[in-house]
Amino acid sequence: MSLGIYIQVPFCQTKCTYCNFHTGVVSSARFAPYTAAVQTEIREHKKRLQQAGIILPVSLAQEAADTVYFGGGTPSLLDPQHLHAMLGAIRETFVHDFREVTLEADPETIDAQKAAAWAASGINRVSFGVQSFSDVELQAAGRMHRRADVYRAVPILRAVGIRNISFDLIAGLPHQTPESWRNSLDELVQLAPQHVSVYLLEVDEGSRLGSELLRGGTKYSALAVPSDDAMAESYDLARTALSAAGYEHYEISNFAKPGFASEHNRKYWRRTPYLGFGAGAHSFSGTQRWANAHDAAAYVQSIASGKIPVEQAETISPPRAFLPSPVSSENATRDFAAMDSSPRDSRRSNDTACPSR
């Protein structure tokens, strides 16, 4: 068994209309204090968790951390030295043998200098929030990047040696049509990322667009959101197109070229222990689950006062803690057939993305 490390960076340049995550648009002056607090939490996590009533299994200290995931938010907004410092805190604190170090990034935030610094720090996988290759859809969703930014960013990463690249796409964005979705899939296949995540638009009160849809409003291009049936058809088309392009469908929302399934993401499905650091980060020790408070300012203040802002904690019996996930098997095709998974199950959730989301 191994250990996963998750670091939550809850900062964005703007809030997308469909976003229901606990993130915020803040001054970059808050980045350094936040990342310093994360480093402190990493180095002092055992003592502080014990104060909060969470006792880590002795066996966990013997496990090597082999995956790290910087999620958000938009971690690529941080200065590379902040990412390097947090990785340094992990290296100092944990037995480690990093196989996969992932950074979530928005395409427009990437430049050659940043990418080189990421690679030098040990980041070897980047997950892009592409969402669509249609500028009309991207603009309606409140995204900062455009199609051209994706084409510009991918060669930059590959040039510095970061060749394990993942794309996110969302089926159901406003103004999306069967033709534009097919085009997004075609352009994705042309760029040939090693990994793809396909999510269906979530509709709930946690996002501006979701709230508008639920009340029957017209803001945020709500009237241009495809129907549930259209989203389901888009998901089915993605499964067909990606399979034809050589991607294996190994989890409900995730597809990968052979050998490129996300090792970190698989830990969540396999119930492997992982420790989360930062505001809103979730953790699972094998016997307990807990989560930090979501407010970034309160998180920094709590760390500065010598505490850890654990907001919720739950002790879990071993049979329940290690119950296999329905799609955690290597035989993903068999698992999907057995569970008769609906495309609506691929709506982005805590089980298909980072645990803090």
Image (cartoon, helix red, strand yellow):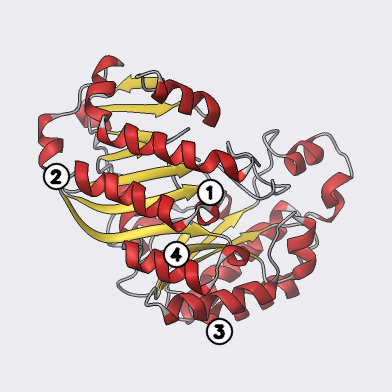
Which of these two is toward me, 317 or 8? 8
In-front residue for pair 354/252? 354
Label number found at residue 126: 4
**Residue reaching furthest to the bottom:** 190
Percent across and percent down for residue 242 are 50, 74
Farthest-out residue, right: 218
Question: Tag on residue 190?
Answer: 3
Q: Which of marks 2 and 4 is nearer the N terminus?
A: 2
- The nearer-to-camera label among 1 and 3 is 3
Distance CA(mark 2)–CA(mark 4): 25 Å
Q: What element carries label 4?
A: strand
Dot 4 or dot 3: first in sequence order is 4
Name which residue type carries label 3.
Answer: Gln
- Disc 1 secondary structure class: helix
In the picture of the structure, the residue carrying the numbered disc 2 is 63
Circle nearer the viewer, 1 or 4: 4
